[in-house]
Image (cartoon, rainbow, N blue to C red):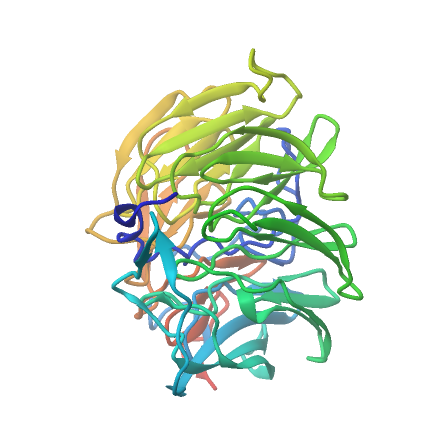
C-alpha cells in the first residue's frame, strides 16, 4: 500500500495521465498522416504528429489565430476531429451542507491529504465543443451537476481526464460521476456508471481508450481490492467485459500496442504491469510492477513498450513485444533505467529515441532499442515546473511548462533549445497538434496558434 509520504508530494499527480489512445504500431515505421488529434497524445497515444509547417515561434501578440475564454477549471487536454475541438471543464459551486468525502484508510488509520478538497461543494461537469477555425463555442453540455464522491487536490481539477472521439461520438469520463457519450451535435447518446471510485482524495487521472467497437476504462481503486478494467459498446454503452485486477490506485492510462499476436492493452501499476486482450479483457501477460506511483502513460515503438514512474522511485522498463519470456516466464526485458523520470509528465518515443523528462523539464535521451544514454541533463533556459507531457512533430519536441512557456527542442541525440514561446498564462494540459494549428489549453483561455494568424487578435 502507498504510504503517506508517497502521497504528500502528489500536488500535480493527476494532471497528466489523461489518455485516449487508439492502436500503436510498435514497429519502426514512418509517422502516419494523421489529420485529427482524437485523444490524449494524439491518434495513437504517442504524442507524435505528422503535421509539418506548424509555427515554432509565438507570443501573446504573434501567431495567435484566436483566443477564447474558458469557464471553470480543467486540466484535460483538447481533442480535435475535423472542424471541431472538444474539451471538458469543472465549475465549482456553493458548499452543500453535510456533503463530505469518504474516509480514506492507510495502515489501518484514517488519513487525509492536507491539500485535499472539493467533495463538500456542488460541481458542474461539462463537455464543450468549439469551432477549430474560429474558436466559436458551438455547444456545451452538462454531463453531471451535484456533489462529487471524493476530494481532489487543490491544484487538480474534476476535469483532468481527456475525452476521446471516434469521429461520431465523444466519450468523456468523470470517475465516480460516470462515463458519457455525446454525438457531434451535443446529444447525450448514453451514460454508464463505474461505481464509486475512491482516489485517496487526490482525484482521478486515467481516461477512456478506444479499440474497435469498444471504449475501455481502467478503474483502479485506492486499495486494489475491487479494481477492474472494463469495456463498453461504443454505440449503446452496454458493458461488454469486465476484468478484476489486484492493483492499487493508479493514474496512468492504458496504451494499445501491436504485440506478437495482435493488439495488446498495456496497463501500468505499482504491483503489476499487465497486458490484456482489448477485445475480451483476457490477461495476456504480467510483469513485476513499478513499485511506485503509476502516473506517466506508457509509450511504444521498435517492438518495445516502455513503462515509467518517477515517484517515489525513478524507474523505466522496456519490455519486448515479440512474445519472448525471461527464465521466470515474464516478458523479456530489453533494458531498464533508473534516472531522469517524472512524477507527472509522460515520456515520449520519437524516431530512434526515448526522451525522459523530470517534473523540472530536465531531459534525458536514450536509444529506444538499447537504452543507451545519448544525453542527460538537458535543461530549459529558466527554472520551471512541468505538468504537460511532451509532444513532437517534424524533428522537434515541445515542452510546455506550468508558466505557459513552450520550449522547442531539437529532436535527436544532442540537446538544443530552438525557441521559447508563451501564451501569457499558466498551462497544465498537453497541446494538440493538427495540420496548420497548435491547440493549447491555458487556465483561463483556449488558444489556436497558427502561422496564418493575422496581426489583429481575434476574440470571442
Q: Which residue occupies the foreground of this view, 124 or 34?
A: 124
- Expressed as whole percent of the image width and height from the top left, the position of residue 195 reads 60, 64
Above or below, 403 relative to 66: above
Tell me the quarter of the picture where residue 405 sits. Answer: bottom left
Tell me the quarter of the picture where residue 94 sits. Answer: bottom left
The answer to whether any part of residue 298 appears in the image is yes
- Expressed as whole percent of the image width and height from the top left, the position of residue 143 reads 60, 78
Q: How many marks?
A: 0
Quadrant where the N terminus is found in the figure: top left
Above or below, 15 relative to 351: below
- Expressed as whole percent of the image width and height from the top left, the position of residue 419 reads 32, 51
Left-right relation of 277 to 129: right
The residue depicted at 51 percent of the width and 44 percent of the height is 394
Left-right relation of 284 to 102: right
The residue depicted at 60 percent of the width and 54 percent of the height is 20
- Expressed as whole percent of the image width and height from the top left, the position of residue 64 reads 42, 71
The answer to whether any part of residue 201 appears in the image is no
Amino acid at each position: 500500500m502507498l504510504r503517506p509520504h508517497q502521497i504528500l508530494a502528489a500536488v500535480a499527480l493527476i494532471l497528466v495521465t489523461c489518455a485516449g489512445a487508439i492502436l500503436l504500431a510498435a514497429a519502426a515505421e514512418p509517422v502516419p498522416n494523421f489529420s485529427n488529434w482524437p485523444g490524449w497524445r494524439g491518434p495513437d497515444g504517442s504524442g507524435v504528429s505528422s503535421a509539418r509547417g506548424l509555427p515554432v515561434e509565438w507570443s501573446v501578440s504573434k501567431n495567435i489565430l484566436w483566443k477564447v475564454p474558458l469557464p471553470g477549471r480543467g486540466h484535460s487536454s483538447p481533442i480535435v476531429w475535423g472542424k471541431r475541438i472538444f474539451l471538458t471543464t469543472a465549475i465549482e459551486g456553493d458548499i452543500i451542507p453535510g456533503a463530505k468525502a469518504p474516509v480514506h484508510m492507510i495502515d489501518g488509520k484514517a488519513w487525509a491529504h492536507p491539500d485535499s478538497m472539493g467533495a463538500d461543494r456542488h460541481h458542474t461537469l461539462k463537455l464543450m465543443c468549439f469551432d477549430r477555425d474560429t474558436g466559436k463555442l458551438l455547444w456545451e453540455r452538462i454531463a453531471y451537476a451535484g456533489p462529487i464522491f471524493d476530494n481532489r487536490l487543490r491544484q487538480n481539477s474534476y476535469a483532468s481526464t481527456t475525452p476521446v472521439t471516434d469521429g461520431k461520438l465523444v466519450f468523456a469520463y468523470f470517475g465516480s460521476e460516470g462515463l458519457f457519450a455525446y454525438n457531434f451535435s451535443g446529444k447525450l447518446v448514453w451514460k454508464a456508471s463505474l461505481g464509486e471510485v475512491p482516489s485517496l482524495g487526490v482525484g482521478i487521472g486515467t481516461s477512456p481508450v478506444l479499440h474497435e467497437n469498444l471504449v475501455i476504462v481502467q478503474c483502479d481503486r485506492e486499495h486494489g481490492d475491487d479494481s477492474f478494467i472494463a469495456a463498453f459498446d461504443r454505440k449503446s454503452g452496454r458493458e461488454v467485459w469486465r476484468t478484476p485486477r489486484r492493483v492499487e490506485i493508479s493514474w496512468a492510462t492504458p496504451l494499445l500496442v501491436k504485440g506478437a499476436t495482435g493488439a495488446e492493452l498495456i496497463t501500468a501499476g505499482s504491483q503489476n504491469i499487465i497486458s490484456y486482450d482489448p477485445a475480451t479483457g483476457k490477461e495476456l501477460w504480467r510483469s513485476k510492477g513499478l513499485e511506485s506511483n503509476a502516473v506517466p502513460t506508457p509509450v511504444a515503438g521498435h517492438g518495445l513498450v516502455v513503462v515509467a514512474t518517477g515517484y517515489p522511485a525513478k524507474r523505466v522498463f522496456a519490455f519486448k513485444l515479440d512474445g519472448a519470456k525471461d527464465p521466470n516466464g515474464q516478458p523479456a526485458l530489453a533494458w531498464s533505467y533508473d534516472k531522469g523520470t517524472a512524477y507527472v509528465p509522460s515520456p515520449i518515443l520519437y524516431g530512434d529515441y526515448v526522451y525522459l523528462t523530470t517534473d523540472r523539464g530536465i531531459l534525458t535521451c536514450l536509444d529506444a532499442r538499447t537504452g543507451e544514454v545519448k544525453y542527460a541533463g538537458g535543461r530549459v533556459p529558466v527554472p520551471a515546473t512541468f505538468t504537460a507531457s511532451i509532444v513532437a512533430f517534424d524533428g522537434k519536441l515541445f515542452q510546455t511548462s506550468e508558466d505557459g512557456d513552450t520550449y522547442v527542442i531539437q529532436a535527436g541525440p544532442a540537446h538544443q533549445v530552438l525557441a521559447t514561446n508563451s501564451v501569457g498564462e499558466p498551462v497544465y494540459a498537453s497541446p494538440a497538434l493538427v495540420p496548420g494549428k497548435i491547440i493549447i489549453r491555458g487556465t483561463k483561455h483556449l488558444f489556436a496558434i497558427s502561422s496564418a494568424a493575422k496581426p489583429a487578435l481575434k476574440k470571442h
